[in-house]
Amino acid sequence: MTHPTPDQGRGAHAAPVIRLQSVQKSFALPNGEVFDAVHSLSLDIQQGDVFGLIGKSGAGKSTLLRLINLLERPDAGRVFVGGRDLTTLSRSELRDTRQNIGMIFQQFNLLQNATVFDNVAFPLKIHGRHSKAEIDARVRECLVLVGLAEKIDTYPAQLSGGQKQRVAIARALAPRPQVLLCDEPTSALDSETTRSLLETLRDINQKIGVTIVIVTHELSVVEVLCRNVAILEKGRLVEQFAVDAAGDAERKTALGREIDELVRRREREARESRVQQAPAQFGAQELAYV
Ligand SMILES: Nc1ncnc2c1ncn2[C@@H]1O[C@H](COP(=O)(O)OP(=O)(O)OP(=O)(O)O)[C@@H](O)[C@H]1O
Ligand SMILES: [Mg+2]
C-alpha cells in the first residue's frame, strides 16, 4: 500500500513539528518509591507524518504522548511543538499553544449534555476569538471532514462508538491544529468501525496535512495507518523505522518483526491479487514482473 508522502515543500530536512529532547518523567508511588515512566527520551516527528507509538502495557506510551502537549510536565528535557519550547511557556501561553495540538482518547470524552454542534464548537468558544458565524462555519466544515454533517443536532448518547470518536476528532480539529494526538482511539471499537475510523484519519492527514501521533496496541493499526513507528520498552525508545521499509533492516524487537511480517504479507496478497486479475494474454515472463 502506498502511504501519503509528506508535504514535498517541507521535505525531510525541514525542522520537525515535534521535537522531544531528552525528556524524562518519573512518578512518586504511594510506597515512597519513584518510578521512571520515561527515561531521557529523544524523538523527532516530521510535519505531515502519521507516527505510531507502540509497546507493551505500562511501557510509557500514554505518558510519552501526554508529554507532547504537556498534560504531563517533564521532570527534565524540552518539548518543542511547531518550533516553540512548551516547557518555557506561562500557563496562558501554554493554553494558547495547545490550540495547535488536538487530542483524542479511547473513551471519546465528549460532553454528554451538549449536542454534537456544541461539542465541536467548545474549543472555539472557550477561546472567544471567533464570531458566531465563524464558529458555525468551522463546526460544519469539521463535521463534513469526519462524515457526520447530518448528526449536528444529535446528543452523544444517540451516537454509536465510531460516531462518538468522529465527533471527538472534529472537536480536536476545530482550532486547526498542526498536530493530532490519539491515545488508543480505536480500542473501544469493533474491527469494522476501526477500519472505517482509520480511513477517516488517513483521509484527514492527506486532506489537511495534520501530523498524527497515535498510541495503539493493535499492530494492524500501525500497518494500515502509520508511515513511521517507534517501539517503547520500559520507558525507552528501543527502535524506530518506516513502516513501508519492511525487510530493509534487522528489527531489534519482536514487535518490530511482527510489523514487518504484516507488511510483507499485505504486499504478497496485493501481488497475488494483481496476478489473478492480470489479462489472459500475459505470459509467464510478464507475470513474473507483476
Ligand atoms: N500518575 C501516575 N502515577 C504513578 N504511576 C504512573 C502514573 N501514570 C503512569 N504511571 C506508570 O507509568 C508507567 C507507564 O504508564 P503509561 O500509562 O504511560 O503506559 P502505557 O504504555 O500507556 O500502558 P497501556 O498500554 O496499559 O495504556 C506504568 O507503569 C504506570 O503505572
Ligand atoms: Mg496507555
Image: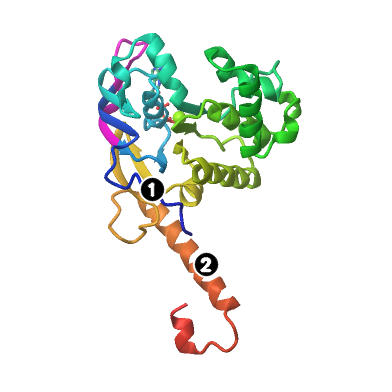
Is ligand 1 within 8 Å of the beta carbon of the residue shown at mark 1?
no
Of labels 2 and 1, earlier in sequence is 1
Q: Is residue 105 visible?
A: no
- Residue 55: image x %, image y %? 39, 39
**Which residue: 65% across, 47% down?**
192
Query: What distance separates the C-alpha of mark 2 from that of mark 1?
Result: 23 Å
Q: Main secondary structure of the magenta part?
A: strand
Residue at point 43%, 62% (across, down): 264
| Residue at the spot of label 2 | 270
In the picture shown, does residue 88 fall above or below 2?
A: above
Q: Find the magenta span and give its range.
A: 25-43
Residue type of the residue flagged with mark 2: Ala
Instruction: Identify which residue, 20 or 257, lies in the foreground.
Output: 20
Label 2 close to label 1 by CB (< 8 Å): no
Task: Examine the structure image and report whether residue 31 is included in the region drawn in magenta.
Answer: yes
Q: Which mark is residue 255?
A: 1
Which label was assigned to residue 195?
none
173 to 50, vertically: above or below:
above
Question: Measured from the top left, where is residue 14 in percent x and y?
Answer: 29, 41
Closest to the observer, 95 or 166: 95
Q: Secondary structure at mark 1?
A: helix
Name above or below for residue 231 compared with residue 138.
below
Image position, residue 92 (x, y; %):
40, 10
